[in-house]
Amino acid sequence: MAFTTLEARGQILDDLGAAVDQIALAAALLAEAYEQLDVTTADRLEDQLYRPVQRAFGRAKRTHAQFAERSRLSPQPFEPTALHVRRHSFKEMIERAVATASDADRKIAELQDSMLPIEAGDGELRAGLGEVRELLGALTSRAPQFLRTLGR
């Protein structure tokens, strides 16, 4: 069954929205981990891990909203996710944040591979998706080193 351009754009927004939600969760997990760390380590976490995720969250939301506007579709409202219970250690939260961000990156990669951004999207959408993936890549590449140096 063939997609109409409008349906394809709606699918793009839905898929990107799911990735944005995961990025928000990754940011919330890192914020919770931050609260459990000493000041020096927390500052390192903020610089190396949290900022790239926050930037990815902002860029993904902006990409979503701007594409929705250009497509004359309703953008999805996104808010940062708040976690209220500390059920895990900071290390577990960081690992979960990395896994969640990796899932978001995978969702965006699948969207890019689907060819929908080429067939029903535009250059600005494709550039935004690429930027988000680059920022998420910074988290996944820095997290193992950060975790290895905890306590040193």
Image (cartoon, rainbow, N blue to C red):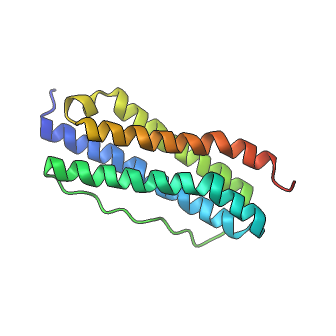
Q: Which is nearer the eye, 62 or 78?
A: 62
- In the figure, 3 relative to 66: above or below? above
Which residue is rendered at x = 42% and y = 47% of the image?
A: 19
What is the quadrant of residue 109 in the picture?
Answer: top left
Residue 40 position, x and y percent, is 77, 65
Which residue is rendered at x = 13% and y = 36% of the image?
A: 5
**Which quarter of the image is occupied by the N terminus?**
top left
Q: Which is nearer the eye, 139 or 3?
A: 139
Does any portion of residue 133 appear in the rendered image?
yes
Which residue is rendered at x = 36% and y = 62% of the image?
A: 78
Does any portion of residue 89 appear in the rendered image?
no
What is the quadrant of residue 11 in the picture?
Answer: top left
Which residue is rendered at x = 38% and y = 49% of the image?
A: 18
**Which quarter of the image is occupied by the C terminus?**
bottom right
Residue 54 position, x and y percent, is 50, 57
Q: Which is nearer the eye, 86 or 140?
A: 140
Residue 111 position, x and y percent, is 35, 34
Pick out the residue farthest to the right.
152
What is the quadrant of residue 9 in the picture?
Answer: top left
Q: Is residue 108 left or right of residue 6?
A: right
Residue 6 position, x and y percent, is 13, 41
- Callout count: 0
